[in-house]
Amino acid sequence: MVDFEELDGVGPAIAEKLRSAGYNSVENLAVATTGELMEAAEVGMRVAVKVINAAREAANMGYERATKVMERRRNLGRIATGSASLDKIIDGGVETQGVTEAYGQFGSGKSQLAHQLCVNVQLPPEQGGLSGKAVYIDTENTFRPERIAQMARAVGMDPERVLDNIYVARAHTTDHQMLLAEKATDIAKNDGVRLLVVDSVTAMFRTEYCGRGALAERQQKLGRHIATLHKLAELNDLAVFVTNQVQARPDVLFGDPTVPVGGHVLGHATTARIYLRKSKANTRTAYLVDHPGLPPESATFQIVEAGIRD
C-alpha cells in the first residue's frame, strides 16, 4: 500500500487534509476530480492535477487484458433475494462492484426487497449471502427494524445480531444524502460492509429541484451522487442497491405510462435496472429492463411475513 506522502506533490500537510476529507487510499485519490481535490486539500489546480496523476500512476489504473477482467468478474459476490426466480433473471442475485436499481409504484415491493437484502447479505456464501454487514440510507422514512427482525427469524438468524450489523441513517436533504454515501466509505473499509442501500435515491432530488429551470442542476448533482456510489461499489467490492420512484407520462395513451424518475442520467449510470409491478394475489412481477450482460426477462415472487419468496 502506497502512503500519500510518497506521491509526487503531496507533503505531510496536504496528506493530513486529504485523510480528514475522507480519502483513505491511493485508489480513492486516483478517481477524484480536480475540483474535489482542490476543495478538500485547499490547493490550486496545478497541484491537484499533479497529485491525481501521481495517484493514478501508483494505482496502476491503465489498460489490462480482458482475461483479467473475466477472472475478476468470476469472483464477484452475489446476494440472494429470497426468490429463486428473481435471482435467476439477475444471474444469481444482486452483484457486488455495481449499482442495481429497482423502480416501481408505491407498494410494488422496493423497500421490502431492500430489507430482505440487508438480512441476506449476512448469511454465509453457501446460503446466498456474503457474511457481511449493511448500510441503509433512508430518505423516505421507510426503514423498519421490526420487518428486519421478522425476516431474520424466518432464515434462522438472531434478530438482535442482524439489526446490530445494519448501519442506518436518515437523510434530510440531497447534500446530506450525498455526504452519507461518502461517509459509508469509512465504514466499508473498517467494518466488513458488503451492501449499501439507498431508499429512495431520487426522492430528495425530486423534492428539492422542482420545475424545468432546476432540471439541469438536479441531473448534474444526481449524476455525481451515482458516480460516488459506483466508486464505493468498485473500490470496496460491495453491492449497491437503490430504489427509485416513478412518474406518469400523460402523453402515453397505450401501454404502461409510468417511467422511472431520474431520466437518462440514472438510466445510463446503473448496472442493472429492475421494474417491479403489483400482480394478482399478493404477488409481484419483476422485469429486468436493462443489464450489460443479460437479456430482458421477468420473474414472479411473493411478499409474505417471512420476506421475499417464490
Image (cartoon, rainbow, N blue to C red):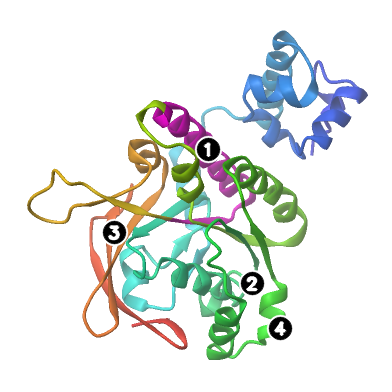
Answer with left or right where residue 94 lies relative to residue 33: left
Q: Name the residue under label 4.
A: 160
Image vertical order of residue 297 relative to residue 177, above or below: below
Sequence-first tag of 2 and 4: 2
Looking at the image, the residue that sits furthest to the top is 46
Per the rendering, the mark at residue 288 is 3
Which-is-in-front pick, marks 2 and 4? 4
Q: Mark 1 points at which residue?
A: 227
Image vertical order of residue 248 relative to residue 115, above or below: above
Image vertical order of residue 98 relative to residue 158, above or below: above
Residue type at the position of mark 2 = Ser
Determine if the magenta segment contains residue 1. Answer: no
Question: Quarter of the image containing the N terminus?
Answer: top right
Secondary structure of residue under mark 3:
strand
Q: Kindly check if marks 1 and 2 are in contact, taking CB atoms under 8 A apart as contact.
A: no
- The percent coordinates of residue 60 (x first, y second) are 64, 30
Sequence-first tag of 1 and 3: 1
Which-is-in-front pick, marks 1 and 2? 1
Answer with left or right where residue 276 lies relative to residue 6: left
Q: Kindly check if marks 3 and 4 are in contact, taking CB atoms under 8 A apart as contact.
A: no
Tell me which residue sits at (65%, 20%) in the image: 35
Q: Name the residue under label 2.
A: 131
Q: Kindly check if marks 2 and 4 are in contact, taking CB atoms under 8 A apart as contact.
A: no
Residue type at the position of mark 1 = Ala
Whole-number angstrom distance, CA of label 2 to CA of label 3:
26 Å
Tell me which residue sits at (50%, 43%) in the image: 68
Q: Label 3: how many residues lie within 10 Å, few (<14), some (14-19) or many (20+)?
A: many
Whole-number angstrom distance, CA of label 1 to CA of label 2:
26 Å
Sequence-first tag of 1 and 4: 4
